[in-house]
Amino acid sequence: MQRFRIFSFLGSLTLLAAARPAHAPQAPRPDFAGLYRDAPQLALDTRREGDSLRLYLRLPAPARLGAGHPLRVVLWPNFEAKAPLWQDSIARRRQHPRLAPGGGVQLSFCLSVAQLPAGAALQVTTAPADSKDDYQAPGTSAWLRLTEAILARPFVLTDSAGQPLHRRYVRAGETFGVDSYGLMQPLRWKRYASLPTPALPPMSNPAALPAGPRVLSVLDSAAARPGEPLLFAEPGLYTLRVGGGVGGIAPRTLAVLVAANNYPALATASELIEPLRYLTTSQERQRLTDAPDPKRAVDKFWLDIAQRDQRQGKELIRQFYGRVTAANRLFAAHKAGWLTDRGLLYVVLGPPPGVRRFANGEERWYYPDGSLNGGPVTYTFRPRPSTFAPDYYELVRRPEYELLWYAAVEKWRTPLTALTGPNVPSDLPAR
């Protein structure tokens, strides 16, 4: 690929350039962009308990509850609904608060399953009742689409201390558990042969590429005693099958990503090089890999982009790998978050300034000044749930994104423009 062919597009860029609209359209309300901020999150998980659904919350420190900050639950017919089906405040005596490992507070309470229709959107918030942005603040609001699987799953993943894990990934060598409701249930795990593939650029035609395997082969499997701590030494894609024992509980399956020890952060040279595939050619990445000191070669790659300005080079590294780490945390599925479609846009284009969720499950990201003429551009994601990735979203790819994509990549590789994106200090020197 010739320098991403961006220079061959310069004539097209000139023809397409136009005056920027005085007021670029914003994402229609409700806007969920705040939930994708790189900030502490209010974490939410669930477990079916008879006729109830237990909600587990972890409030980031400093947790604010009590007068002016009640714990509220709101059930919406869908993410587009203008009026809720019902809402309620959870009294303090029902919250069962306890300190969370690493700070913050753990809470749990139950709701009647009869009040929770499948397909509805559940909002849990600790923001003041009169707050206009309570649905957008990641530290005080969490959302959950109530699928049949969520409403039926009678177990929750826990950490080594027995506290809810609040994530669908564990680190290789990390001890965790499965806490089932009711009688102890049989547990069996499987490890699959899976080659995590990076997301395709937004203008790609997936139909033109070879299809992946429809069925993943099993590399290993074993039964575990109910209540026995689990520890997987090998990174990869696993499933946990819980149930089918005494009591007639139907077995349920949950996929778990076992990631490198530092996930969601990056540590090794290969981990630092891999995300650069969104900005580089395969030959460039191979040179980094083959260098005598690959980590130092990565630093030099960014320093060369910054024209030997160490301050700019460090800022580029901070921004790029900060986005990769955030994408890993936000979008982890059957593979690392940066490898997913949403992770692709998050890393290269930045957190979406506007996000709208639709009743049909679609999610649209709005970039008010993301087009070539400085106007708005929209990217649409459609849900593609599976056993391995129940919350996975696939980007709707279009040929017209090609110029936009190469221009975005070139911003990273051109010192004069690489530092003009969001979240970059304005006092950085121009080059």
Image (tube, rainbow, N blue to C red):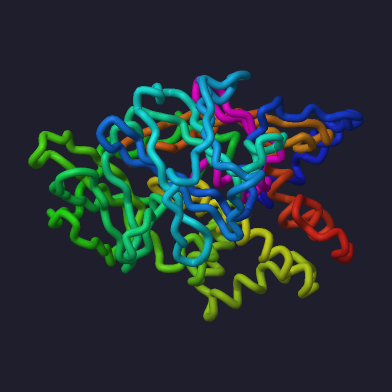
Q: Position of residue 232 (x, y in %)?
A: 27, 63
Whether residue 353 is situated above or below residue 208 in the rendered picture: below
Residue visible at 19% across and 57% down? 227
Residue visible at 39% across and 33% down? 111
Q: Is residue 303 visible?
A: yes
Instruction: Identify the image quadrant of the C terminus.
Output: bottom right
Which segment is the magenta one? 339-365
Q: Position of residue 179 (x, y in %)?
A: 26, 51
Q: Nearer the viewer, residue 133 or 355?
A: 133
Q: Is residue 235 left or right of residue 25?
A: left
Q: Position of residue 47 (x, y in %)?
A: 33, 41
Image quadrant in which you'd find residue 106: bottom left
Q: Nearer the viewer, residue 221 or 330?
A: 330
Residue visible at 66% across and 44% down? 68
Whether residue 338 is situated above or below residue 380 in the rendered picture: below
Tell which residue pokes out farthest to the bottom in this image.
292
